[in-house]
């Protein structure tokens, strides 16, 4: 998650109210809105709705590429009038799909150079993750069938654009996010209900072989946590370390009438996780993943019932020891409830985007599991999403999902501690 320090990083101090009423940040930090839902894009069409997961890649002297998800479903367009992702010739999976990705080129001075759709014809592109070869994997959080079945992972290169062929070996399920370890193994979260989703590991047949290599296939398995017979919410003590095993998925691409992936593996002993959301690779090679909440055994909605109550858990998976550790537990009533997307930069802390009830925050998390505010949505109660640092660490890019969907560039005295 962060660099080793003798003293864990404690944050940048109190937030300063934004006179524009949009985004509060610590003293010395500033922001620029670089993209706004509905604005004309330089490569045609208008900026789509529902900004979500995102990653930044170096564009050399030109600045940075951003590949950004849009979590748009058909009902969002037909019933709510939200803007779909424009269809891209040669990069459209399903002509009936309305989601996808856009790609932005942002100069080093944090001004937009170009913007356009890069993958289309998908639906509910929630999060995803960057690959070790610097492309973006965008994930569908829906298994609906339109003109084609959905629920897949797709690869998008910032320069070459999107590949409309799904990576079926990574499973058909309600994908959330993914991250890679140093050996090229991918870890995927699933945000699903009745039953809850799981945490998966994908072993590629051709690890670390570059763009398109994941289409060569591999094996998919779900995590089974030793000593947990219910779901992961039952673990309530930060610092708890548990050993894990892996349950192989027998049918990674189930049809609409087949047993869903999560039902296959839970029946075989995999551990359910309520609202399995963000996942990111720490600088030490560990994999951090999030459970946004646990509504407990008395939840009003049957699909939200869990073994215990919490307002967010942040876990660390150690690929060498094959263990997980509960690093942070957000108790009910925490102002930072509902952590969702998570990222880590070079400045000594991780950063989570909240998606809880009411106020929305960018919350920092240090190596000791302590939290601090970094940003506050003063504009509305829409979630933050897609936080990602530029490769040089000087700029944080993040979305407010909207409407209106906004993409920010944030910079300031990152070196200042406390």
Image: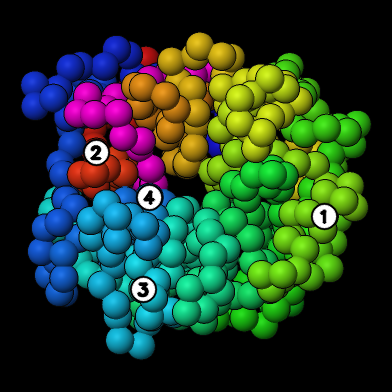
Q: Is residue 93 left or right of residue 44?
A: right
Q: Which residue is mark 4?
A: 52
Is residue 224 visible in the rendered image? The answer is yes
Disc number placed over residue 276 in the picture, else none: none
Mark 3 element type: strand
- Quick one: which residue is furthest to the bottom in this view? 90
Q: Which residue is mark 1?
A: 265
Q: Earlier in the sequence, mark 1 or mark 2?
A: 1
Q: Earlier in the sequence, mark 3 or mark 1?
A: 3
> Where is residue 303 shown, x and y percent of the image?
65, 37
Mark 4 element type: strand
Q: Is residue 269 left or right of residue 365?
A: right
Is label 1 in contact with label 2 (beta carbons under 8 Å)?
Answer: no
Magenta residue span: 368-393
Disc 4 versus disc 1: nearer the observer: 1
> Where is residue 117 shown, x and y percent of the image?
27, 71
Residue at 32 percent across and 14 percent down: it is 13
Mark 4 neighbour class, 10 Å CA radius: few under 14, some 14 to 19, many 20 or more: many
Residue at 69 percent across and 73 percent down: it is 255
Is label 3 in contact with label 4 (beta carbons under 8 Å)?
Answer: no
What separation in Å lies between label 1 and label 2 (alpha carbons)? Answer: 41 Å
Disc 2 versus disc 3: nearer the observer: 3
Is label 3 in contact with label 1 (beta carbons under 8 Å)?
Answer: no
What separation in Å lies between label 2 and label 3 (alpha carbons)? Answer: 28 Å
């Amino acid at each position: 998650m962060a660099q080793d320090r003798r003293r864990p990083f404690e944050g940048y101090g109190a937030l300063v109210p934004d006179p524009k009423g949009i985004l509060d940040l610590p003293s010395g930090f500033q922001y620029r809105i670089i993209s706004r839902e509905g604005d004309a894009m330089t490569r045609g069409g208008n900026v789509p709705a529902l900004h979500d997961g995102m990653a930044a890649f170096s564009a050399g002297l030109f600045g940075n590429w951003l590949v950004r998800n849009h979590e748009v479903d058909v009902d969002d367009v037909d019933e709510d009038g939200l803007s779909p992702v424009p269809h891209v010739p040669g990069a459209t999976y399903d002509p009936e799909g309305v989601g996808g990705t856009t790609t932005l080129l942002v100069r080093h001075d944090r001004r937009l150079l170009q913007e356009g759709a890069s993958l289309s014809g998908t639906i509910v592109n929630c999060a995803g993750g960057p690959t070790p070869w610097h492309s973006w994997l965008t994930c569908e959080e829906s298994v609906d069938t339109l003109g084609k079945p959905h629920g897949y992972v797709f690869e998008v290169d910032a320069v070459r654009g999107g590949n409309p062929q799904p990576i079926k070996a990574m499973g058909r399920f309600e994908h959330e996010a993914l991250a890679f370890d140093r050996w090229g193994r991918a870890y995927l979260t699933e945000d699903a209900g009745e039953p809850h989703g799981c945490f998966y590991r994908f072993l590629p047949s051709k690890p670390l072989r570059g763009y398109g290599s994941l289409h060569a296939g591999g094996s998919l398995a779900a995590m089974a946590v030793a000593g947990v017979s219910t779901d992961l919410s039952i673990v309530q003590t930060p610092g708890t370390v548990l050993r894990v095993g892996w349950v192989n998925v027998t049918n990674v691409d189930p049809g609409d009438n087949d047993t869903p992936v999560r039902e296959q593996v839970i029946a075989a002993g995999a551990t359910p996780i309520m609202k399995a959301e963000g996942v990111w690779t720490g600088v030490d090679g560990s994999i951090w993943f999030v459970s946004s909440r646990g509504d407990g055994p008395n939840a009003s909605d049957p699909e939200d019932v869990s073994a215990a109550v919490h307002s967010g858990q942040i876990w660390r998976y150690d690929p060498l020891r094959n263990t997980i550790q509960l690093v942070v537990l957000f108790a009910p009533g925490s102002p930072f409830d509902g952590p969702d997307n998570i990222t880590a930069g070079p400045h000594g802390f991780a950063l989570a985007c909240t998606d809880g009830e009411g106020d929305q925050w960018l919350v920092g998390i240090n190596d000791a599991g302590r939290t601090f505010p970094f940003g506050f949505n003063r504009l509305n109660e829409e979630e933050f999403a897609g936080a990602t640092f530029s490769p040089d660490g000087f700029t944080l890019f993040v979305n407010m999902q909207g409407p209106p969907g906004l993409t920010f560039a944030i910079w300031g005295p990152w070196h200042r501690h406390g």
